[in-house]
Amino acid sequence: MIKKAYEKPREVEYIEFKGRENFKEVGEFIGERVSLITNVEGKEKLMRKVFKDNVSYPIGTIFYKYFDEEIYDYAIKVSNKKSFFDKYGDIN
């Protein structure tokens, strides 16, 4: 589920990667094709292609975006849950 949070005075939209249950929704949120992979320990990860490399993210990773006035487009950022909530307060 997509939620909203804020950093005074910036408001951001964010989604937490929860594994199989929402990896497609995360891909739609960031506007990229993503894959769900399972490592040898059975832990699910989200994989996306960044430039020429594949990058994987564990369950609990927060993807967030905000409108950046300087580039006049949405900036997409990635954070772990603790760092994100240390910086942003939840609106919902």
Image (cartoon, rainbow, N blue to C red):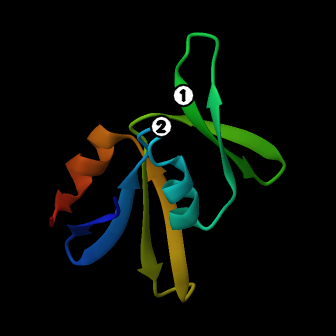
Q: Residue at x 47, y 81 (%)?
A: 68
Task: Give 33 or 72, whichever is nearer the viewer.
Answer: 33
92 relative to 46, above or below: below
> Which quadrant does the N terminus fall into?
bottom left
> Which quadrant does the C terminus fall into?
bottom left
Q: Return the x and y of residue 35 as percentages of the image width and height.
A: 67, 44
Residue 4 is left or right of residue 68, and the answer is left
Q: Residue at x 22, y 78 (%)?
A: 9
Q: Return the x and y of residue 7 as percentages of the image width and height.
A: 23, 67
Task: Give 70 or 63, whichever is nearer the viewer.
Answer: 63
Residue farthest toward the top in the current orientation of the protein:
41
Of the numbered discs 2 and 1, the one sitting upstream in the chain is 2
**Amino acid bearing label 1:** Glu
Whole-angstrom CA distance, mark 2 to mark 1, is 6 Å
Disc marking residue 3: none
The reply to whether the C-beta atoms of the residues labelled 2 and 1 are less than 8 Å apart is yes
Residue 55 is left or right of residue 66, and the answer is right
How many tags in the picture?
Answer: 2
Q: Residue at x 52, y 85 (%)?
A: 70
Q: Return the x and y of residue 11 as percentages of the image width and height.
A: 28, 75
Q: Secondary structure at mark 2?
A: loop
Q: Return the x and y of residue 83 as percentages of the image width and height.
A: 31, 43
The residue carrying mark 2 is 19
The residue carrying mark 1 is 44
Q: Residue at x 51, y 56 (%)?
A: 26
